[in-house]
Image (cartoon, rainbow, N blue to C red):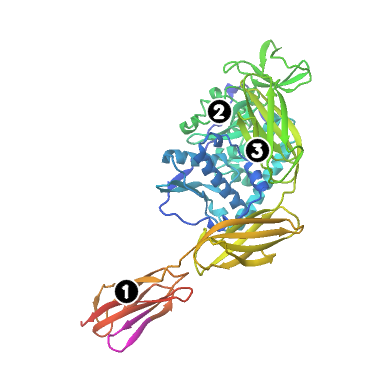
Amino acid sequence: MHTPVWAGTENKIQIDTNKCGYQQLNVTEATEENHWTDEYRSISVPQETIDTWKSYSSTYYYDQLPAQGQKMWDELELACIEATESKSTLTTVVANSYVTGVSKQQFIQWTRMFKISHPQYFFLSNSSGYWSSTDGFRPFLMIYDKFQDGQTRHDAVQEFTKKINTWIQTINKKENDEQKEKCAVDLICNNTIYQAGTFDQSAYSLVCEGKTVCAGYAATFQILMNALGIETIEVVNSNHAWNMIHLYDTWYETDVTFMDQNNEEKAGYFYGIAYKYYNKSRKTFLKEHVLDDNYAGYVPKTVCDSVTGQNYIYQTPYIKNAGNTYCILNGNPEVGEYLLYAVNVSSAPVPSSINFEDKIWKVKDNTIKIQFAIAPQKAAESGGSVKLSATAFGGKGSYTYKFLVYDGKSTWYKIRDFAADSSCIWKPGATGKKTLFVDVKDQAGVSRRAEAAYEINQKGLQVTLKTDVDGKAQNGTQVHLSATVTGGTGDYVYKFIVRNTKDEWYKIRDYSKANSCTWNTGASGKKTLYVDVKDSSGAYKRVSIPFEVVQKQELQAKVSVTPESTAKSGTKVQIQVQATGGSGTYSYKFIVFDGKDTWYKIKDYGKENTCEWTTGPAGKKTIYVDIKDSEGNYKRIPASFEVTKN
């Protein structure tokens, strides 16, 4: 660790504030839709894994979006999580559907907000795009070239999360939220140099390479704080990124990049960690941190200045009075009244104000009382529904409620952010002992927390059935069915069935340990596909999906010849065929008939749909193209042609 060096008062020493480098996400329209992500969208990701990845980010921006914006974010995030689990080669992550009822400008802003709100998906590059149609806009996010290879991306995910979780364990040993914040700042600054690089818009550059620009600092700080249950967001302008953090019911602005003055010792410059940029107000930050106008309507108000950065050196924000310990929320009378928060109370009730060092300090009212009810009580099955309810009294005015769960290790999950509804439904994932929390905030912004121990037990069978085609196939073709199962006990066996609209049932395959099978489609019409699953204890689960078998189109083709209908003897003629219908891929054979009794094979069967023919003797000819599809279906197409003398 570096030891901070102090050489006098703030106005006699400089801070390097040229440490920017943020680049806005590039969003461009794509001309042609493709299937870049189809190969991994069938991955079944455990709920525990989804919850863990989501815990690294805040829903602050998300909660302010309308329904179509939230749906877009949900689809993009699930695609990102699937990419962390997949070992397939991928170039993008893509939303499933189009965003409707929104302008292009607003859609692009939502895409950029998604990127800075989800720094845990470090493999996303700074390029993205969308497809546009009458249905709206469908977004995709590009993956850095390095992480497009599945195994490389998998290895990077392991390296990244191992480092992040090691830091989280270190930070979580601290006594309270502010001390955890300082520990995170110190870890980042003492393990990073400010330096541009290939991945400097990603947290990967800081976590795995130890070098980055402001974008990497802000992204990493956001990940660490949110993982510890301390809500933190990233804010930006044209070339700089920093953070806003919600600490003790108060929003602050923090710039870890400017705090990190560890790179090199220079005469007249501060060397160390400059806490001048730690937990400040908008008024204090305004000169060096002008917000992008596109974010101004989304970010919270920051109206307090911590005292921790006096003369750049960290100074404790804690004071003791009458047996109670308080954290100084605001120590700058230029931005507001002196304000404290009671973090450790041994003498109750907490006063509304105290006299300390000849100043009157207002104490945020923290006397809210909470009754916390959970149904079912004490325990529930994984994947079930748990109702959380709170009743609050005390404080001031009306309340809002936030529900969280802690896994007993190092991860916090936000069940629901602050809302007026005093109850919510929780769908628990991983089994084990948990601690459930409810935060209650009154109209004055004062918050209190209640908690309850809880246990999640093994869930019953949960089954997903999928096909390798998108809900439709031609009759006479093969469809691959696969089932994914979680829960239950021991090994599973699978049975696959199909039912038509006449309520006729057909067994595709009887019980077997194989979780997939091939179905040969029969008569056209709407169908229902089923899989029956049993576990070792005999527990049973049936799930179904709709499917449609459509009539196979007849094999058709169109032949074009260049020159179109005539050419001189000895010249070269281009023949091309376009085939449709049938099944699978095609092969082509090219022939010419001289109109008398002689046939000439120009080119035997092959995959190429073009060939070149050098004309022979003059006369009227017929060119034929024979086409076969994958099932051996055959079609012959003629084209009249005349060869003239030179």
Foreground of the two, 472 or 287: 472
Residue assigned mark 1: 574
Q: Main secondary structure of the magenta part?
A: strand
- Residue 134 badge: none
Upstream in sequence: badge 3 or badge 2: 2
Which residue does the image show at 28% across and 85% down from the upper left?
A: 594
The picture places residue 63, in percent across and down from the top left corner, at 56, 35
Mark 3 → mark 2, Cα distance in angstroms: 27 Å
The magenta region covers: 590-602
Residue 185 seen by the camera: no
Q: Which residue corresponds to mark 3?
A: 425
Q: Position of residue 559 (x, y in %)?
A: 33, 72
Q: What residue type is labelled 2?
A: Pro
Q: Which quarter of the rendering shows the C terminus? A: bottom left
Identified at 66% across, 47% down, the residue is 47
Question: Is the residue marked by circle 2 packed among few (<14), some (14-19), or many (20+) residues within 10 Å?
Answer: some
For the residues bearing labels 3 and 1, Cβ distance under 8 angstroms: no
State the separation of the CA atoms marked 3 and 1. 68 Å
User: Given the image, on which type of amino acid does mark 3 rest?
Assistant: Ile
Left or right of 14, for residue 608 = left
Q: Nearer the viewer, residue 372 or 32?
A: 372
